[in-house]
Amino acid sequence: MALSSDELVKRELIDTIGYEYFDYQARVFPEGSNQDQKKYFEGGLTFSFDKSDYGSCDVAYIDLKNENKLPFIAIEGTDALNRGSSGNAQYQRFHHALGAVKNGFIGIYYLRPGNLQLQKDLYAMAYHSTKIEKGYYVITQDIEEIKEILRYGRESFEILDKYLNELIYSKFQIFLDSFNSRYQNDWNLFSEKRSTIIYKDYLIKYSARNILNFTDGSQRAGHIAVGEMYLTKYFFPELKFYYLWPRMTKLELDFLNASKKHDKEWNLLSTEYNVSLKTIDDLVGVPKAMKDGFKEISKDPLKGKSLLKYNLLIAELRKLIVNGKVVLIKD
């Protein structure tokens, strides 16, 4: 039987780095165990911040010289690049290691090399999260970089800090080169292609989420929405971020806030600092025909005629917002 993505990555990390390395010891659990779902300080691999859980990591290396057995690094790994994940799926696990970063540790997102390309947007997300959070975020495809971080951890803090900042910035430069190539260094062109409207001190990111994405267990749109949220938040860390879902109503959003209080992904979406969820009811000036149009396809899978209708509606809604004819009610 083929190994799962998580198990394959765990074995590769331990085989390459070792269960013990210098004065670090790995905390890792076998496939099928739920121990990783426990919080780190309860013996698991899940990091929490401001009462929110940020998903479980695959491996943590614990500093045995630290009397509190703090994690030196926490690693989230995936074999996504060998399993057809060329786009949004790569963002979906970003938040797993982010919990460690928010707590002041080193979070590492390891994407095992494969036949697909890594989304270079991840480098920008890691760079900006390092700038505004307590810890460091490293995106890597090279286990030797992880070993190097562990080695520098046995040097002075100044040497480790210098290495990490230079590593993270060098990867950010890869993103900048890619951004220049794709969007001619033009954020307006980016915003048009990436469902975003950028203002001086805030932005609107619109998406086709509907209530079934979060209530139908067969759909994993929660993970996708969290990935999109962190992509946008860390692309524009200085801006207030309004996450607009025009296929949803205020009543539906209230229902989700009430019924999904203990859902990890919903908790991240609804409580992340400087992010606010908005629906069609938070827009003033929407023509009745347009509002009715979004309602008609609010529960539809977006394909065929429903997808065509959504694309027409959202293109027109964007124009109305940009031209100031439809206004978002801000917090």
Image (spheres, grey):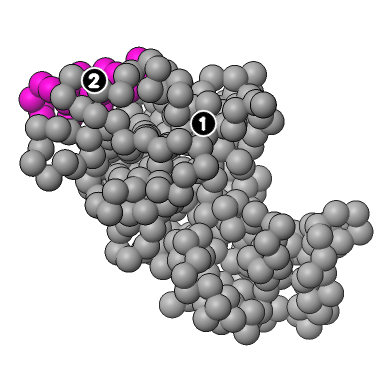
Q: Where is residue 319 drawn, in percent x and y?
A: 69, 63
Name the residue tied to disc 2: 21
Q: Is 302 contained in the magenta span?
A: no
Q: Residues within 10 Å of mark 1 (few under 14, many from 20)?
A: some
Amino acid type at circle 1 is Glu
Residue 257 lies, with reference to residue 137, above or below; the image says below
Which of the image's four quarters has the C terminus? bottom left
Quick one: 137 or 316, which is closer to the camera?
A: 137
Q: Which secondary structure type mostly characterizes the magenta part of the structure?
A: helix
Q: SS for tag 1?
A: helix
Q: Measuring 65% from the left and 26% from the top, which residue is drawn there?
A: 2
Can residue 249 be seen from the camera position used here? Answer: yes
Q: Measuring 54% from the left and 45% from the top, which residue is drawn there?
A: 92
Name the residue tied to disc 1: 7
Q: Where is residue 185 drawn, in percent x and y?
A: 52, 34
Which of the image's four quarters has the N terminus? top right
Q: Where is residue 9 drawn, in percent x and y?
A: 49, 27
Amino acid type at circle 2 is Tyr
Q: Is 284 on the left-hand or right-hand side of 39?
A: right
How far apart marks 1 and 2 lie (CA) works out to 20 Å
Q: Is 147 contained in the magenta span?
A: yes
Q: Which residues are magenta?
A: 143-166
Q: Measuring 8% from the left and 41% from the top, which residue is drawn there?
A: 67
